Amino acid sequence: MKIDVRNMYTTYAINPLALKDTRPRLSWVVETSERRKKQSAYRVLISSSQQLIEQNEGNIWDTHKIESEDNYCYYSGEELESFKRYYWKVKIWDEKGEESTWSKTSFFETGPLNKSDWKAKWITKRDLKTFYSAGDFSTEKFKHYHAAYFRKTFEIKNEVQSARAYISGLGFYELYLNGEKVGNNVLDPGQSEYSKEALFNVYNITSFITEQNCVGVILGNGRHLEQFGYSKPKLIIQILLEYVNGEKEYILSDESWGSSHGPLQENGMYYGEKYDGTLEMPDWCTYHFDASNWEEVEVTEGPNLRYQNMPPIRVTKILKPIKMYTLKPGVFVYDFGQNFTGWVKINVSGPKGTQLKLRHSELVNEDGSLKTNTLRKAEATDIYILKGEGKESYEPRFTYHGFRYVEVSGSPFVPTIDNIEGRFIHSDVEKVG
């Protein structure tokens, strides 16, 4: 078997969409089934188009043949442009000078390489409802805010070739477009020192775009709290539309956006979450939704931005409880058989306004009740208020728990073991062994 190439990385990521590095690191994995086989040389091509890379033309950069056993190199060509896709591939030679075929084509996209490339503004809701909750250890309760909803409508001018959304929301955010959640990340963005910088993500939203569009964002507290020296939750988003005729258009967070409260209310890392289904706003993130009662947003200051070039947190496994028992009338405990980090999704039905309470714990007492001393001051409780419209399901957005047991109270019926499932979350890192 000849020597070959697989798993190509640009600055440790596969096909990144918002590269910040102007001299990115290009690396690859050498593959062969023969022992003592090794790379002796490589050649890397970078092109500005799919067509050119398929023609083996490196109009951006061509290393030519480099005698080296290193399975990486650093780009050293002309300065890269912001918001542009580059295509690259590599071939290698073995210790006998035998040449491999060209690798599959990989790509990377640059994001905003300069601070001036960010044309959007940080925005926040003017009047945010507050509540107070203790942290992990402290007996003092600190100010938190109810979740805030944001939206803006826009129309496209021509046929769209590509669309990207560059976004950060502090503390946590979820991005929606035309009524659908964008991506499957949770608890974004990653944690940083918010006074200095915030991490942003980029999403390929081309498939979401229609003639008439609505972009929406929900913001939660996360760790962006006044007790740590920060202000209200805020967001920044910059959508870049590239048309087939070569024109570009930006949809930016600014004074033109609207904001509102909604069904997602109290939320906190240690507190949990409260969601009132009776306050749901069907189609709130659609073009024709009546947002006349939404208020204007407030423009605010924000930190510098850096691309979140790390695996996001995702739901990586669905867990079923191994048993369920009745603690006392109307109070039920589910045992998942293991500790894990995440939350539960519960399926219920019942009268409008029924309040369902879910408490979490790693341990139970001898009588089967939750042993919550390991939680210290954390409440670790999620509350769902039913909207009373047949079968409903609920899972939190802006909190997580470390737990094995879940106590459910307030259910209008006797639940079964099939009414609930665990959502195991962690950084979605690649398995390598």
Image (cartoon, grey):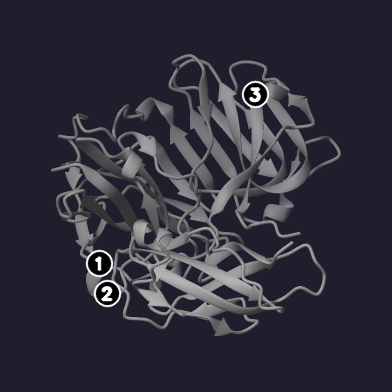
Q: Are marks 2 and 3 in contact (CB under 8 Å)?
A: no
Q: Nearer the viewer, residue 407 or 26?
A: 26
Q: Position of residue 336 (x, y in %)?
A: 75, 37
Which mark sits nearer the N-terminus, 2 or 3?
A: 2
Cα gap from disc 3 to disc 1, whole angstroms = 45 Å
Location of residue 282 by image quarter: top left
Mark 1 residue type? Trp
Q: The residue tagged with tag 3: helix, strand or loop?
A: helix
The residue mark sitting in front, 2 or 3, is: 2
Q: Residues within 10 Å of mark 2 (few under 14, many from 20)?
A: few
Q: Quadrant of the N terminus?
A: bottom right
Mark 2 residue type? Lys
Location of residue 108 by image quarter: bottom left
Q: What residue lies at 25% left-to-right and 67% top-to-bottom?
A: 118
Q: Position of residue 17 (x, y in %)?
A: 40, 60
Which mark sits nearer the N-terminus, 3 or 1?
A: 1
> In this orientation, does residue 225 appear?
no
Judged left or right of residue 274, residue 318 is: right
Q: Residues within 10 Å of mark 3 (few under 14, many from 20)?
A: some
Q: Position of residue 97 (x, y in %)?
A: 66, 78
Q: Residues within 10 Å of mark 1 (few under 14, many from 20)?
A: some
Q: Tell me the number on the disc at residue 118.
A: 1
Q: Is residue 293 above or below residue 311?
A: above
Q: The residue tagged with tag 1: helix, strand or loop?
A: loop
Q: Which residue is mark 3?
A: 419
